[in-house]
Amino acid sequence: MNTGIVIILYNPDARHVCELVKAFRAPNWHMVLVDNSAVPDERFSSADTTYIHCEMNVGIAKAQNLGLKTLFDKDIEYAFLLDQDSLFSPAIADELLKQFITLEKKHPIAAIGPSIYCQFSDCIDQGVLQKGKKVSDNLKEVKQIIASGMLLSRHAFERVGEKESALFIDGVDHEWCWRARSKGMVIYQSLSACMPHRQGDDRVKVCGITFKQGAPIRLYYQFRNVLILARRRYVPLYWKLRHLCAIPLRYAVNRFCFQQGSQRGQYMRAGLKDGVMCRFGSIQRDKDV
């Protein structure tokens, strides 16, 4: 069965990306690479892949939409979304595809993703407040999954709609899952397909609590998009409460406990301001950051 794979790139490790492409180099896999890097990389352009270079960074959501529409316009029915550092294999893909096809005959499924083996904690991520509802030995129903390893169909993409490009990055994949659930569709996570994954650049413990540490600019989008998404009725209440209540603590930790604290503080304040004002898209570079 013809299936597609979309990989989103931004200044990637070229060696890893080439290895990922090589692993899926077969007639039944159609691969699209969407590159948000400033300079195109000809190493990713070949006869058996479609390489799309964006002249400016359009964000992860729009890049995902470009890749998915490229595949679905070719009448490909199923597509995986991957990050540039995803540790993904044909074995994981085959298991997820088999489960998806079985499920869609019984339920209006929007997407399925693998279990995530966190490389920082060396264990399978079970979720903090929402661990999901186990429906079989190999499957559980969840409220959301991350994009890395997400499998969706052309039918689901048409029914739910595109990823929300106005969010740019952070919260994009969860928002799409919540929107799908509001339309009566189901999100699943496989218990038989597991993928190693790193979220953020590092983990730092402060007063016994572990915090994700990423690039300072990501804090702008994280803080802004929490305020934007918290206004929406279809966003789960537990998520709103958890993330809104965490804002003061996250601000204090990033501002006073992490390196580049002053810059982090500027990005967080800009994100909060634009979240209150409901400003979307990419951060305006004329901001005082």
Image (cartoon, rainbow, N blue to C red):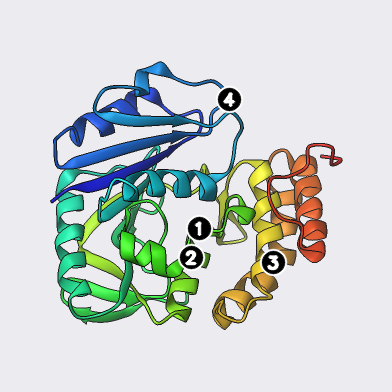
Q: CA distance from mark 4 to mark 2?
A: 27 Å
Q: Who's the residue at 20% across and 59% down the image? A: 96
Q: Which residue is at the front of the view, 191 or 23?
A: 23
Tell me residue 208's x, y (percent): 56, 62
Q: Which residue is mark 1?
A: 163
Image depth: mark 4 or mark 1 in front: 1
Which of the two labelled residues, at mark 4 and mark 1, occupies the earlier sequence position?
Answer: 4
Q: Which residue is mark 3?
A: 228
Q: Amino acid at mark 3?
A: Ile
Which of the two labelled residues, at mark 3 and mark 1, occupies the earlier sequence position?
Answer: 1
Q: Which residue is mark 4?
A: 38
Which of the two labelled residues, at mark 1 and mark 2, occupies the earlier sequence position?
Answer: 1
Residues at circles 1 and 2 in contact by the CB criterion of under 8 Å: yes
Where 205 sits versus 84, above or below? below
Which of the two labelled residues, at mark 4 and mark 3, occupies the earlier sequence position?
Answer: 4
Q: Who's the residue at 30% across and 42% down the image? A: 87
Is residue 128 visible to us here? no
Residues at circles 4 and 1 in contact by the CB criterion of under 8 Å: no
Q: Amino acid at mark 2?
A: Trp
Q: Which residue is at the front of the view, 115 or 69?
A: 69
Q: Which residue is at the front of the view, 176 or 271?
A: 176
